[in-house]
Image (tube, rainbow, N blue to C red):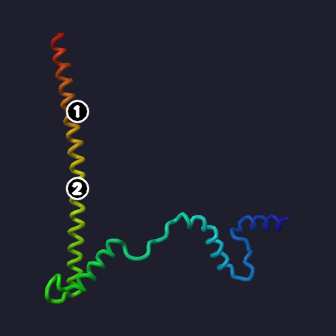
């Protein structure tokens, strides 16, 4: 009777049943986990392969500068100089974008401040009326 109870408890602890057939258990486990997560794989977006848009633009700019040295100067440009020029252009573009976003935020803040000032003026006007009415009544 003790052996039967022990077997039942051991069967309850089994996570993966032995159905491997002719291949090893680790291969079966790998296949089992893949099949288990297969419905979720379609929901998870695939990793983007290749360069980002910014990197592609920088690479294109570097290639054009290396191929067309006449546009930049008479002497050929080294790759490090091209990298520095492209990085400088990208930094200036990023700074321009940052300035634009800050300007938009400042405009929004100015509008909010104008609304608050208008509400404050209305409140002050109401308070003056209330004070004048209270002085008349007393």
Question: For residue 52, which quarter of the picture?
Answer: bottom left
Q: Which residue is drawn at 73% across and 71% down?
A: 17
Q: Where is residue 112 in the image (x, y as percent from the top left)?
A: 24, 42
* Quadrant into which the N terminus falls: bottom right
- The foreground one among 126 and 72 is 72
Image: 78 above or below 137 = below
In-image side of 118 versus 27 (left or right): left
Q: Where is residue 90 in the image (x, y as percent from the top left)?
A: 24, 71
Image: 63 above or below 113 = below
* Badge 2 element: helix
- The foreground one among 138 and 14 is 138
Q: Which numbered marker is on residue 119?
A: 1
* Badge 1 element: helix
Task: Give me the C-alpha separation between circle 1 and circle 2.
Answer: 26 Å
* Quadrant into which the C terminus falls: top left
Total tally of numbered discs in the picture: 2
């Amino acid at each position: 009777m003790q052996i039967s109870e022990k077997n039942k408890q051991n069967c309850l602890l089994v996570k993966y049943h032995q159905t491997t057939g002719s291949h090893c258990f680790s291969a079966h486990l790998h296949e089992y986990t893949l099949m288990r997560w297969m419905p979720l794989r379609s929901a998870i977006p695939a990793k983007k392969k290749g360069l980002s848009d910014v990197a592609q633009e920088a690479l294109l700019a570097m290639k054009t500068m290396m191929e067309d040295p006449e546009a930049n100067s008479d002497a050929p440009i080294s790759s490090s100089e091209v990298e520095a020029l492209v990085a400088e252009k990208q930094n200036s573009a990023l700074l321009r974008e940052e300035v634009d976003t800050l300007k938009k935020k400042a405009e929004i803040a100015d509008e909010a401040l104008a609304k608050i000032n208008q509400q404050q003026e209305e409140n002050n006007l109401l308070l003056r009326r209330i004070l004048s009415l209270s002085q008349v009544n007393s």
